Image (spheres, rainbow, N blue to C red):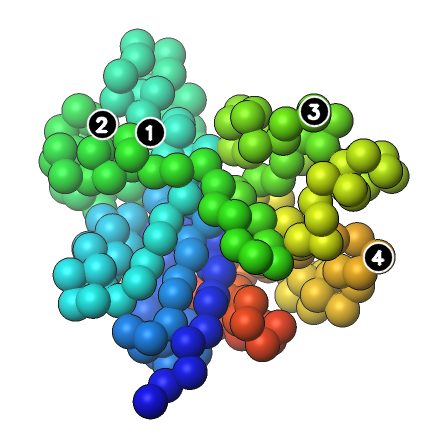
């Protein structure tokens, strides 16, 4: 019988082939749990394929939980908002998402996908970890009641100097994405979580060939504290 493991992946950004290859690499099984920390869509070539792979895995009994990222929020704002919000989304990778669905407007994306994004939670609490897309506003007394920060915050590590924030964490590590960093940075952070209880696993999969040091999709085995990477296709 397989030993259950917990994995986290973030910022797939439409890189469906890379996502599938990474699942094969970690030998993801129905006894494992996978948490995807938002930004399934935009920029990469096949956002629809990412959704369909997740739907298929869930239907086959795999334990996959997805969180809301700022790009899902951008899509929802475009879907429900005005032309200005649609323009913002399109300028941030929405064009590629529409192409993957073979439609021209966010309202043409099938309801199944819209409903899935609309119902995504902002965070998950595990015994040793808090999983979230961007991070937490540790200046607040109740960081998990600040959804905007969970989607958008950057440069928040200095807030760990606040003793109240460290006490609130209660020895848990915040695992997140949103701000692309190199593989080496992620590897170093995993070794130093006792000093800085945060782990950024966004290695810029969709930025392959566009930003130096990026272009990988990362999976962290939270159970065994191991990292895996797969490089973006093409």
Question: Whole-Å distance between the Cαs marked 4 and 1?
Answer: 36 Å
Residue at screen point 64% across, 49% down? 174
Q: Which quarter shows the N terminus?
A: bottom left
The foreground one among 208 and 86 is 86
Q: Categorize mark 3 by other alpha carbons within 10 Å: few (<14), some (14-19), many (20+).
A: few
Q: Which element carries disc 2, helix, strand or loop?
A: helix
The foreground one among 192 and 167 is 167
Which residue is label 2 attached to?
A: 106
Q: Upstream in the sequence, badge 3 or badge 2? A: 2
Q: Tell me where residue 15 sits by quadrant.
A: bottom left
Q: Categorize mark 2 by other alpha carbons within 10 Å: few (<14), some (14-19), many (20+).
A: many
| Labels 1 and 3 touching (C-beta < 8 A) | no
In the rendered view, would you say 26 is above or below 36? below
Front position among marks 2 and 4: 4
Question: Whole-Å distance between the Cαs marked 1 and 2?
Answer: 7 Å
Q: Which element carries disc 4, helix, strand or loop?
A: loop
Question: Whole-Å distance between the Cαs marked 3 and 4?
Answer: 21 Å
Q: Which quarter shows the C terminus?
A: bottom left
Query: Which percent across, then down, holds residue 193?
Result: 75, 60
Which residue is label 4 attached to?
A: 195
- Which numbered circle lies on residue 140? 3
């Amino acid at each position: 019988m397989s030993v259950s493991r917990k994995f986290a992946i973030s910022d797939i950004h439409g890189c469906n082939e890379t996502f599938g290859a990474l699942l094969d690499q970690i030998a993801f099984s129905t006894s494992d749990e996978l948490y995807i920390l938002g930004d399934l869509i935009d920029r990469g070539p096949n956002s629809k394929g990412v959704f369909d792979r997740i739907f298929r895995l869930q239907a086959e009994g795999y334990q996959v939980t997805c969180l809301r990222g700022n790009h899902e929020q951008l899509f929802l704002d475009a879907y429900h908002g005005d032309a200005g919000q649609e323009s913002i989304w399109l300028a941030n990778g929405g064009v590629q998402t529409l192409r993957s669905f073979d439609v021209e407007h966010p309202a043409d994306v099938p309801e199944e996908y819209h409903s899935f994004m609309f119902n995504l939670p902002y965070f998950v609490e595990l015994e040793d970890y808090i999983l979230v897309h961007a991070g937490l506003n540790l200046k607040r007394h109740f960081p998990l009641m600040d959804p905007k920060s969970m989607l958008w915050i950057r440069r928040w590590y200095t807030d760990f100097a606040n003793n109240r924030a460290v006490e609130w964490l209660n020895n848990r590590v915040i695992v997140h994405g949103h701000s692309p960093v190199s593989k080496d940075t992620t590897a170093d952070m995993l070794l130093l979580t006792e000093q800085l209880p945060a782990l950024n696993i966004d290695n810029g999969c969709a930025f392959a060939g566009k930003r130096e040091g990026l272009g990988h999709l990362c999976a962290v085995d939270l159970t065994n504290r191991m990292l895996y990477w797969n490089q973006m296709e093409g």
